Amino acid sequence: MIAEILCVGTELLIGDVVNTNATYISKRLSEHGIDVLYHSVCGDNPERLEKCLNHALLRSDIVVTTGGLGPTYDDITAEICARALGIVMCDSDEVEKSLEEYFRRSGRVMTDNNKKQAKIPKGAKIFTNNYGTAPGICIEKNGKIIVMMPGPPREMKPMTDDEVIPYLSKYTNKVLVSSNVNIFGMGESSVETKLHELMLSSINPTVAPYINDGEVRVRVTASAENENKAKELISPVVERIKSELGDVVYGVDCESMEKKLVELLLRNKLTVSTAESCTGGMVSQLITNVPGSSEVFGFGVCTYANQAKMKMLGVKEETLEKYGAVSEQTAMEMARGVKELSGSDISLSLTGIAGPGGGTEQKPVGLVYIGVCAGEKCYAKKLLLAQHGRSDRGFIRTLAAKNALKAAIDEAGEIKQSL
């Protein structure tokens, strides 16, 4: 079946609220074999909403709406949806009792305008809202289905998972399963070039690349009658992608690089430490955001000033004078210093010019050195991270931190092989 998501709310159109509802609902419907082909957004205007809804019903079997189910005058979704399918509105004793119970439990007084929410399309299926007052509503007529849910995500998400998805699952006999190959160190265009023939020839599963903050993920999606059969279709394609791309693949279905690193360190009983300059503690923060990181990360320093590099990490004054703070030599001495202080298996250092100022012809904005010490090995990597001559400080810092995480992932893998 073809589905469309219609999110209602002027706040979405003017940018006051980010429309995360469509993303969440799309993912959940797709996982259950319902093809989401359209997204649309409409403000709180009855004429425009009715036009949007009628257009959606012409091209889709299921229309899922969010928003416009509240108690105020501009909450008009239920009335407009009922009108579109030629269904009258009527009072629901079930909803009214549910509203009264909600206000009783919360110790608040129910105002008269809340009773508006108890007026629903005749014969509608009601979905329980355990986190707010607006009930979910489903109406069906002439082969068309309209599902209405509240706009706040904390109300919409559990309703989607607990009630809407189970209800709509009877209309499909397939599932859609995806697996993501996580890549860092190769751009989207290069990934596409390497996998071009595979992408063109793959029908089920499909293969498509996506990019986010310097990372690329290749999504492999299969349609089948059940999850196990879908995974059987996906598995050989994922293995082929890993073989084609090599070391730039850091994992499959990884939530993040830092989570992958922590999992790898925990599994192999390894530890990591950091010494950061241009990233200002970003790598440490990413690692310690992951539950369980205290087992593998116990030491990190932020040494912005040269004096701090010398005093805390033992960077030689002559190294700083001869090569500068942003240099291969300084990065290596920083990595050695933090490794000696911490006793970690792997140590990382970062020093660079994040911008927007401070760059020179010899050392431009975006120049970053990462120092890595693992076992007896110590080396530095030179990175040029400014994109198209632009000095986006935040992006440069993010890329630098991710490059450091990838280096640690690679070293943890090598240490594992030697154990």
Image (spheres, rainbow, N blue to C red):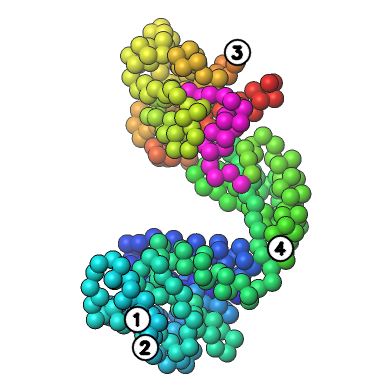
Question: Which stretch is magenta?
Answer: 253-274
Q: Which residue is mark 2?
A: 91
User: Could you say which is closer to the camera, residue 28 or residue 266?
Assistant: 266
Looking at the image, is 175 positioned above or below residue 110? above
Note whether residue 409 is visible: no
Label 4 element class: loop
Q: Please name the residue that numbered disc 3 is placed on.
A: 376
Label 2, label 1: how many angstroms apart (C-alpha)? Answer: 8 Å
Q: CA distance from mark 1 to mark 4?
A: 40 Å
Q: What residue is pinned by disc 1?
A: 96
Instruction: State how far apart marks 4 and 3 are (Cα).
Output: 49 Å
* Residue drawn 43% across the image and 66% down it: 156
Category of crowding for the residue at label 2, using alpha-carbon neighbours closer than 10 angstroms: few (below 14), some (14–19), many (at least 20): some
Q: Could you tell me how far apart the alpha carbons at marks 3 and 2 are, in whole angstroms?
A: 76 Å
Q: Is residue 100 above or below residue 409?
A: below
Residue visible at 35% across and 11% down in the picture: 311
Label whose residue precedes the other's in the sequence (1 or 4):
1
Q: Residue at x 46, y 75 (%)?
A: 127
Work out whether mark 4 precedes mark 3 in sequence or the reverse, and give the earlier one.
Answer: 4
Count neighbours of disc 4 (C-alpha within 10 A) and say few if under 14, some if 14 to 19, many if 20 or more.
some
- Which comes sooner in the sequence, label 2 or label 1? 2
Q: Which residue is mark 4?
A: 226
Q: Position of residue 376 (x, y in %)?
A: 60, 13
* Marked residue nearer the N-terminal end (3 or 2): 2
- Name the amino acid type tagged 1: Glu
Q: Could you say which is closer to the camera, residue 132 or residue 156? A: 132
